Amino acid sequence: NAGVTQTPKFQVLKTGQSMTLQCAQDMNHEYMSWYRQDPGMGLRLIHYSVGAGITDQGEVPNGYNVSRSTTEDFPLRLLSAAPSQTSVYFCASSTQGLLGKLFFGSGTQLSVL
Amino acid sequence: AQRVTQPEKLLSVFKGAPVELKCNYSYSGSPELFWYVQYSRQRLQLLLRHISRESIKGFTADLNKGETSFHLKKPFAQEEDSAMYYCALKNAGGTSYGKLTFGQGTILTVHP
Protein backbone atom coordinates (compact mmCIF):
# COMPACT_ATOMS: atom_id res chain seq x y z
CA ASN A 1 0.00 0.00 0.00
CA ALA A 2 1.86 3.08 -1.25
CA GLY A 3 -0.39 5.77 0.28
CA VAL A 4 0.39 9.20 -1.18
CA THR A 5 3.18 9.27 -3.76
CA GLN A 6 4.84 12.49 -4.88
CA THR A 7 7.33 12.94 -7.69
CA PRO A 8 9.92 14.29 -8.11
CA LYS A 9 11.59 14.54 -4.69
CA PHE A 10 13.90 17.35 -5.78
CA GLN A 11 13.74 19.82 -8.64
CA VAL A 12 15.70 22.88 -9.72
CA LEU A 13 14.11 25.27 -12.18
CA LYS A 14 15.12 28.49 -13.84
CA THR A 15 12.85 31.50 -13.57
CA GLY A 16 10.13 31.31 -16.17
CA GLN A 17 10.22 27.56 -16.66
CA SER A 18 7.09 25.49 -16.15
CA MET A 19 6.73 22.09 -14.57
CA THR A 20 4.25 19.70 -13.02
CA LEU A 21 4.53 18.15 -9.57
CA GLN A 22 2.84 14.78 -9.54
CA CYS A 23 0.70 13.39 -6.73
CA ALA A 24 -1.11 10.07 -6.64
CA GLN A 25 -2.95 8.22 -3.89
CA ASP A 26 -4.22 4.65 -3.83
CA MET A 27 -6.63 4.90 -0.89
CA ASN A 28 -9.66 6.06 -2.86
CA HIS A 29 -9.76 9.30 -0.87
CA GLU A 30 -12.07 11.99 -2.18
CA TYR A 31 -10.14 14.91 -0.70
CA MET A 32 -6.74 15.92 -2.02
CA SER A 33 -4.77 19.07 -1.39
CA TRP A 34 -1.47 20.80 -2.02
CA TYR A 35 0.45 22.72 0.63
CA ARG A 36 3.70 24.60 0.58
CA GLN A 37 6.00 24.67 3.60
CA ASP A 38 8.15 27.71 4.21
CA PRO A 39 10.26 28.56 7.30
CA GLY A 40 8.29 30.67 9.74
CA MET A 41 5.13 30.36 7.66
CA GLY A 42 4.10 26.80 8.40
CA LEU A 43 2.06 24.96 5.80
CA ARG A 44 -0.15 27.02 3.54
CA LEU A 45 -2.89 25.60 1.35
CA ILE A 46 -2.40 26.16 -2.39
CA HIS A 47 -5.27 24.24 -4.01
CA TYR A 48 -7.81 21.72 -2.88
CA SER A 49 -10.13 19.12 -4.42
CA VAL A 50 -13.19 17.36 -3.00
CA GLY A 51 -13.43 14.88 -5.86
CA ALA A 52 -12.75 14.24 -9.52
CA GLY A 53 -13.56 17.30 -11.59
CA ILE A 54 -13.85 19.63 -8.58
CA THR A 55 -11.07 21.95 -7.44
CA ASP A 56 -10.90 25.10 -5.36
CA GLN A 57 -8.32 27.70 -4.44
CA GLY A 58 -6.60 27.77 -1.11
CA GLU A 59 -4.72 30.54 0.66
CA VAL A 60 -1.87 30.99 -1.86
CA PRO A 61 -3.08 29.86 -5.33
CA ASN A 62 -1.37 32.46 -7.54
CA GLY A 63 1.10 30.99 -9.99
CA TYR A 64 -0.25 27.46 -9.62
CA ASN A 65 -2.79 25.44 -11.53
CA VAL A 66 -4.45 22.11 -10.71
CA SER A 67 -6.87 19.64 -12.23
CA ARG A 68 -8.46 16.45 -10.92
CA SER A 69 -9.40 14.17 -13.78
CA THR A 70 -9.34 11.01 -11.65
CA THR A 71 -9.79 10.22 -7.96
CA GLU A 72 -6.19 9.03 -7.75
CA ASP A 73 -4.23 11.91 -9.29
CA PHE A 74 -3.90 15.58 -8.40
CA PRO A 75 -1.01 17.25 -10.28
CA LEU A 76 0.19 20.75 -9.43
CA ARG A 77 1.41 22.89 -12.32
CA LEU A 78 3.75 25.82 -12.02
CA LEU A 79 2.97 27.98 -15.01
CA SER A 80 6.03 30.26 -14.99
CA ALA A 81 8.31 29.57 -12.05
CA ALA A 82 9.47 32.44 -9.85
CA PRO A 83 12.08 32.49 -7.05
CA SER A 84 9.22 33.11 -4.58
CA GLN A 85 8.00 29.60 -5.38
CA THR A 86 11.13 28.05 -3.90
CA SER A 87 9.64 25.86 -1.20
CA VAL A 88 8.84 22.33 -0.09
CA TYR A 89 5.56 21.12 -1.53
CA PHE A 90 3.36 18.53 0.12
CA CYS A 91 0.41 16.69 -1.30
CA ALA A 92 -2.16 15.24 1.09
CA SER A 93 -5.29 13.14 0.89
CA SER A 94 -8.16 12.36 3.20
CA THR A 95 -11.68 11.10 3.41
CA GLN A 96 -14.60 12.30 5.51
CA GLY A 97 -14.54 9.30 7.77
CA LEU A 98 -11.01 10.16 8.94
CA LEU A 99 -12.32 13.33 10.61
CA GLY A 100 -9.45 15.59 9.65
CA LYS A 101 -6.62 13.07 9.45
CA LEU A 102 -4.54 13.87 6.40
CA PHE A 103 -2.15 11.44 4.75
CA PHE A 104 0.87 13.31 3.41
CA GLY A 105 3.30 12.55 0.66
CA SER A 106 7.04 12.73 1.26
CA GLY A 107 7.33 16.18 -0.29
CA THR A 108 9.02 17.85 -3.26
CA GLN A 109 11.85 20.26 -2.60
CA LEU A 110 11.77 22.89 -5.34
CA SER A 111 14.37 25.56 -5.99
CA VAL A 112 13.77 28.30 -8.54
CA LEU A 113 16.89 30.18 -9.58
CA ALA B 1 -10.65 34.75 9.04
CA GLN B 2 -9.49 31.74 10.97
CA ARG B 3 -5.93 31.64 12.18
CA VAL B 4 -3.59 29.36 14.12
CA THR B 5 -0.66 30.80 16.02
CA GLN B 6 2.26 28.90 17.49
CA PRO B 7 4.33 31.53 19.29
CA GLU B 8 7.49 29.46 19.72
CA LYS B 9 9.60 28.63 16.67
CA LEU B 10 12.07 26.67 18.76
CA LEU B 11 11.69 24.87 22.08
CA SER B 12 14.47 23.04 23.89
CA VAL B 13 14.09 20.84 26.97
CA PHE B 14 16.09 18.13 28.67
CA LYS B 15 15.05 14.50 28.72
CA GLY B 16 12.59 13.83 31.52
CA ALA B 17 11.45 17.44 31.79
CA PRO B 18 7.85 18.49 31.10
CA VAL B 19 7.14 20.06 27.75
CA GLU B 20 4.33 22.30 26.54
CA LEU B 21 3.94 23.46 22.95
CA LYS B 22 1.60 26.40 22.69
CA CYS B 23 -1.16 26.83 20.14
CA ASN B 24 -3.75 29.59 19.96
CA TYR B 25 -6.49 29.89 17.40
CA SER B 26 -9.06 32.34 16.19
CA TYR B 27 -12.26 30.92 14.78
CA SER B 28 -15.85 32.06 14.96
CA GLY B 29 -17.49 28.64 15.06
CA SER B 30 -16.96 25.43 16.98
CA PRO B 31 -13.31 24.49 16.34
CA GLU B 32 -11.86 21.14 15.40
CA LEU B 33 -8.17 21.10 16.26
CA PHE B 34 -5.28 18.79 15.58
CA TRP B 35 -1.59 18.33 16.28
CA TYR B 36 0.59 17.02 13.46
CA VAL B 37 4.21 15.94 13.84
CA GLN B 38 7.10 15.61 11.41
CA TYR B 39 10.02 13.52 12.64
CA SER B 40 13.36 13.73 10.87
CA ARG B 41 13.21 12.04 7.45
CA GLN B 42 9.59 11.01 7.98
CA ARG B 43 6.32 12.24 6.58
CA LEU B 44 4.08 14.67 8.34
CA GLN B 45 1.56 12.65 10.35
CA LEU B 46 -1.34 13.15 12.71
CA LEU B 47 -0.39 13.03 16.38
CA LEU B 48 -3.76 13.67 17.98
CA ARG B 49 -7.09 15.48 17.59
CA HIS B 50 -9.20 17.09 20.24
CA ILE B 51 -12.44 15.30 19.36
CA SER B 52 -10.83 11.97 20.19
CA ARG B 53 -9.61 13.14 23.61
CA GLU B 54 -6.76 10.67 23.27
CA SER B 55 -3.20 10.44 24.57
CA ILE B 56 -0.66 9.48 21.96
CA LYS B 57 2.98 8.75 22.85
CA GLY B 58 2.30 10.37 26.22
CA PHE B 59 1.11 13.64 24.67
CA THR B 60 -2.22 15.22 25.53
CA ALA B 61 -3.91 18.42 24.40
CA ASP B 62 -6.95 20.09 25.92
CA LEU B 63 -9.15 22.50 24.07
CA ASN B 64 -9.70 25.67 26.11
CA LYS B 65 -12.41 27.65 24.37
CA GLY B 66 -12.18 30.52 26.85
CA GLU B 67 -8.50 31.08 26.10
CA THR B 68 -8.85 29.83 22.49
CA SER B 69 -5.91 27.51 23.06
CA PHE B 70 -4.99 23.91 22.30
CA HIS B 71 -1.60 23.44 23.94
CA LEU B 72 0.25 20.14 23.57
CA LYS B 73 1.72 18.69 26.76
CA LYS B 74 3.87 15.81 27.87
CA PRO B 75 4.98 15.32 31.47
CA PHE B 76 8.33 13.64 30.70
CA ALA B 77 9.95 14.42 27.35
CA GLN B 78 11.99 11.79 25.53
CA GLU B 79 14.75 12.27 22.97
CA GLU B 80 12.59 10.61 20.32
CA ASP B 81 10.05 13.43 20.75
CA SER B 82 12.42 15.78 18.93
CA ALA B 83 10.53 16.87 15.82
CA MET B 84 8.59 19.66 14.14
CA TYR B 85 5.09 20.06 15.57
CA TYR B 86 2.20 21.77 13.83
CA CYS B 87 -1.10 22.80 15.32
CA ALA B 88 -3.95 22.78 12.79
CA LEU B 89 -7.57 23.86 12.57
CA LYS B 90 -10.19 22.32 10.33
CA ASN B 91 -11.77 24.86 8.01
CA ALA B 92 -15.47 25.54 8.27
CA GLY B 93 -17.80 23.68 5.97
CA GLY B 94 -18.95 20.11 5.57
CA THR B 95 -16.57 19.37 2.70
CA SER B 96 -13.50 20.61 4.54
CA TYR B 97 -12.10 17.45 6.07
CA GLY B 98 -9.05 17.67 3.81
CA LYS B 99 -8.54 21.37 4.26
CA LEU B 100 -6.68 22.46 7.37
CA THR B 101 -5.20 25.76 8.49
CA PHE B 102 -1.77 25.18 10.00
CA GLY B 103 0.25 27.18 12.46
CA GLN B 104 3.85 28.21 11.85
CA GLY B 105 5.27 25.13 13.53
CA THR B 106 7.48 24.57 16.59
CA ILE B 107 10.75 22.66 16.45
CA LEU B 108 11.12 20.69 19.66
CA THR B 109 14.57 19.50 20.66
CA VAL B 110 14.95 17.16 23.62
CA HIS B 111 18.51 17.02 24.92
CA PRO B 112 19.91 13.93 26.65
Image (spheres, rainbow, N blue to C red):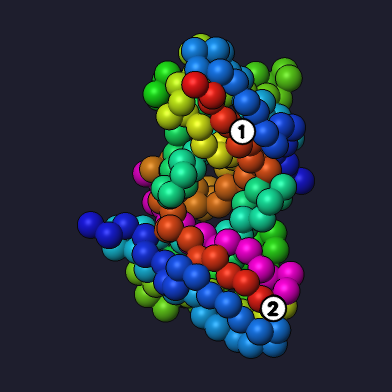
Point out residue B65 in the picture as x, y percentages from the top left corner. Answer: 67, 21
Of residues B75 and B52, the one drawn nearer to the viewer in this rendering: B75
Residue at image point 42% right, 18% down:
B58
Foreground label between 2 and 1: 2
Secondary structure at numbered mark 1 = loop
Which amino acid type is marked by label 1?
Answer: Pro
Q: Work out whether residue A95 can be spotted.
A: yes
In the displayed structure, A113 sits above or below A48; it is: below
Quadrant, the N terminus of chain A: bottom left
- Tell me where the magenta segment starts and ends, as one range: A83-97
In the displayed structure, B71 sits above or below A65; it is: above
Q: Which residue is mark 1?
A: B31
Tag 2 and tag 1 share a subunit:
no
Q: Residue furthest front?
A: B112
Q: Residue furthest bottom?
A: A17
Label drawn at residue B58: none
Query: From mark 2 to mark 1, how far is it between C-alphas?
Result: 40 Å
Point out residue A102 in the picture as x, y percentages from the top left corner. Answer: 44, 48
Q: Work out whether residue B63 can be spotted.
A: no
Answer with the quarter of the image where residue A29 lies. Answer: bottom left
Secondary structure at numbered mark 2 = loop
Of residues B38 and A75, the one drawn nearer to the viewer in this rendering: B38
Q: Which residue is mark 2?
A: A113
Point out residue A74 in the picture as x, y percentages from the top left corner. Answer: 45, 71
Of residues A113 and B94, the one drawn nearer to the viewer in this rendering: A113
* Chain under callout 1: B
Q: Dot 1: within a 10 Å radius of its alpha carbon, few (fewer than 14), some, or many (20 or more) residues?
A: some
Position of B41 compared to A83: left or right? Answer: left
Residue at image point 45% right, 68% down:
A9
Residue at image point 63% right, 36% down:
B106
Which amino acid type is marked by label 2?
Answer: Leu
